[in-house]
């Protein structure tokens, strides 16, 4: 009797195992996409802000954003923790921004952007907050490395040692970038950070 009772359960167990394997296979296929979506949700704004800060152009920053997360999707990097992934994303963002600056298209377009910007600035319909304009002008006086250091230090909350690790520079160099950036901003804005 005991054997008869167990026989119907065996096919159910096999069916369940097959179902579990199929579900597991589907999950493995969905995992990279889900992980990508989670990374975009968690750090997308940070990547976009850093790219915008480095490039000064929203359109170019959006291109860098797409490139960074495409590289994440295509890579098979195993991250030790969330902080490791964030550092990797910021490093790739900086590299992509550097690539964008070296691009012949970027250099050619820079002269076009300057003429469009001067035209828009003269247009009476353009109403931007005076503080934002003043801050943008002051930030434009900083070098790219200084803007990056300021962004990572003040907006992302990284220490100088962490910024050094992300940017591949010495901590003393990062502190120098921050010092010079603060000095320039103090001169341009009349305030200290």
Image (cartoon, grey):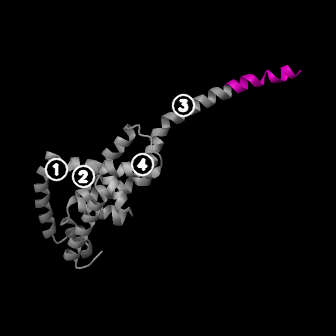
Residue 136 percent coordinates (x, y): 23, 68
The residue tagged 3 is: 25
Magenta span contains residue 11 = yes
Q: Which residues are magenta?
A: 1-14
Q: Foreground residue, 59 or 86?
A: 86
* Neighbours of disc 1 within 10 Å: few (<14), some (14-19), many (20+): some
CA gap, disc 2 to disc 1? 9 Å
Which residue is disc 1 drawn over? 106
Local secondary structure at mark 4: helix
Callout 1 secondary element = helix
The circle on residue 60 is: 2
Q: Are marks 2 and 1 in contact (CB under 8 Å)?
A: yes
- Where residue 167 appears, as percent x and y from the top left, is 30, 53
Residue 107: x and y in percent read: 13, 51
Q: Where's the N terminus, which quadrant?
A: top right
| Among the 4 quarters of the image, the one containing residue 78 | top left
> Looking at the image, which residue is at 42% across and 48% down?
85
Camera-side mark, 4 or 1:
4
As rendered, which of 91 and 22 lies closer to the eye? 91
N-terminal label among 2 and 1: 2
């Amino acid at each position: 009797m005991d054997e008869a009772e167990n026989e119907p359960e065996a096919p159910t167990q096999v069916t369940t195992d097959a179902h579990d394997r199929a579900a597991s296979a589907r999950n493995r296929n969905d995992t990279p996409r889900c992980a990508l979506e989670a990374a975009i949700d968690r750090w997308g704004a940070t990547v976009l802000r850093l790219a915008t800060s480095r490039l000064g152009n929203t359109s170019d920053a959006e291109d860098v954003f797409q490139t960074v997360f495409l590289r994440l999707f295509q890579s098979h990097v195993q991250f030790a923790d969330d902080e490791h992934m964030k550092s990797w994303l910021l490093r790739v963002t900086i590299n992509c921004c550097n690539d964008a600056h070296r691009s012949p298209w970027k250099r050619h377009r820079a002269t076009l952007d300057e003429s469009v910007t001067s035209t828009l600035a003269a247009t009476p319909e353009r109403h931007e907050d005076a503080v934002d304009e003043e801050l943008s002008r002051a930030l434009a006086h900083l070098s790219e490395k200084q803007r990056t250091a300021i962004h990572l230090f003040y907006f992302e909350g990284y220490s100088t040692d962490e910024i050094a690790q992300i940017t591949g520079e010495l901590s003393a160099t990062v502190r120098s970038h921050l010092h010079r950036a603060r000095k320039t901003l103090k001169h341009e804005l009349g305030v200290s950070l």
